[in-house]
Image (cartoon, grey):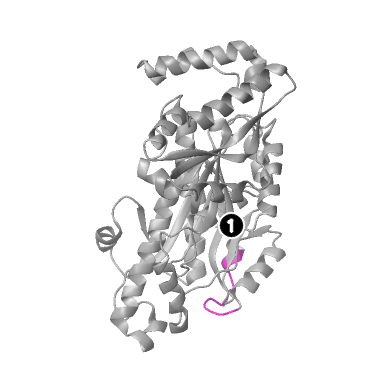
Amino acid sequence: MGPMGERLIVFTRYPVPGTTKTRLIPAVGAEKAAEYQRQMSEHTVAIARSLQSVRPVELEIRFTGGTAEQMTLWLGSDSRLVPQGEGDLGDRLNRAFEAAFAEGIERAIAVGIDCPELNQTRLIQAFEHLYGATGVIGPATDGGYYLIGLNRAVPSLFQAIAWGTEAVLQQTQAAAVAHSVALAYLDVLNDVDYPEDLPLWERVQASSGQPQHDVSVILPLLNEASIIDKTLDRLMLGIQASALSIEVIVVDGGSQDDTVKKVRNRALPILQTHAARRARQMNIGAQAATGQSLLFLHGDTWLPEDFAAQIQQTLKLSGVTAGAFTLKIRGSELGLRWVERGVCWRSRLLQMPYGDQGLFMSAQVFHNLGGFPEMPIMEDFEMVRQLKQRGKIAVAPASVQTSARRWQKLGVVRTTLLNQILILSYLLGLPPATLAKWYRQPKR
């Protein structure tokens, strides 16, 4: 069991020709139908395993139509394999959920393999819904559902259901109302059950690995409850004003305040890691991102309203490999204006912007570099150095506004001096771990 007590249960069948995907057989034949079963199962399991890379979720595969040995040879031994057992689908679902909660699981989700549009983001959203609602359902267009999740056993949801008919969802909702079970809902998606559904599977296969959003905003957080609402307000204004497709991926590093609660109140998906290094958080977020461009945003930095358009325009410039925004610091002290001028000079002439300016780049460039070096400090400095070797780092004309708390804590002169000493020490070869122990900021 993972440390968060979450389990994803995948229901599938061993792909024996003639016994699986039988509704497809008249159109494509028994062998091809079994091949679709194999492909869709592997597709769903791959999504489940990608979720495990960003969230401590246990994967359980409930199977029928084959032996444990056959399933292990097919899907590997790194997942929990359990026979579905006897009974109708309701019996088998209820058995899986009751077993999960008896073993100490706190939130469990069951999915089939028939929904090609099921992805990591929707799975994260489903788990997050279970912090507030008893159950979560992903409705299918055929009147059933492609996903159901619970945070406690509710056998009544699986009793007296006409499985395999268009009444499944309606009957499940009625059972939930009758037993006072609060349900949350995901997007309505299509299942692949009949020959006319196959073009959907082919489209998903053809677009596999292609960007699904224009921009992914990756927001690593640690104990930012005092400022995160304002940061998210500014971010949402920009998303609402943009014609581009934008996703937000929050990665919490183990906050002890109300940061996670405030993010969940926005119904935003949140990844969690107990490794509170910002580099690790940003890499985890980037792994989950589906955007063509990636923006790495600090929790105390406010974006301009047209940030997404600025990112696209900047990255289209000839020879540009990455970019950042002009920096403004929230505060009235005269010294902060001098800091802003110094940052402007450093960013434009030396092409060395830092993380609080909102670094952005294409997903391809990020992954080709291997992500941020997972160091306890100086990860943005080192990333920018690597980016400079690949092309220009441009500065967008719009400004981000960052908190003045670092400079206010120690004073502008002292903070600036310490920053320069830190950079010089790093360039001279002092280990980042040593620098992290020596250099403590009031907030990240």
Q: How far from the left and from the top, in percent, is residue 269?
A: 58, 48
Q: What secondary structure is the magenta-colored segment mainly? A: loop
Looking at the rendered image, the quarter that the N terminus falls into is top left
Residue ranking furthest to the bottom: 26
The local crowd at label 1, few if under 14, some if 14 to 19, many if 20 or more residues have their Cα within 10 Å, is some
Residue ID for mark 1: 245
Residue 35 in view here: yes
Percent of width and height locating residue 423: 45, 18
Q: Position of residue 327 (x, y in %)?
A: 62, 31
Which residue is depicted at the point 40% across and 45% down?
A: 365
Name above or below for residue 186 compared with residue 100.
below
Please give left or right for residue 317 compared with residue 156 in the image.
left
Asked whether the viewer can see residue 55, the reply is no
- Residue 150: image quadrant is bottom right
Task: Give whichever of 420, 191 is nearer the camera.
Answer: 420
Q: Is residue 274 magenta?
A: no
Between 30 and 439, the one lying in front of the other is 439
**On-image quarter of the C terminus:** top right
Image position, residue 367 (x, y; %): 39, 45
Residue at x-position 71% and y-position 65%: 178
Residue located 36% across and 15% down the image: 428
| Residue numbers of the magenta segment | 157-166
Q: Amino acid at mark 1?
A: Ser
Between 249 and 118, the one nearer to me in the picture: 249
Residue at image x 43%, y 15%?
A: 424
Is 224 on the left-hand or right-hand side of 380? right
For numbered disc 1, what is the local secondary structure?
A: loop
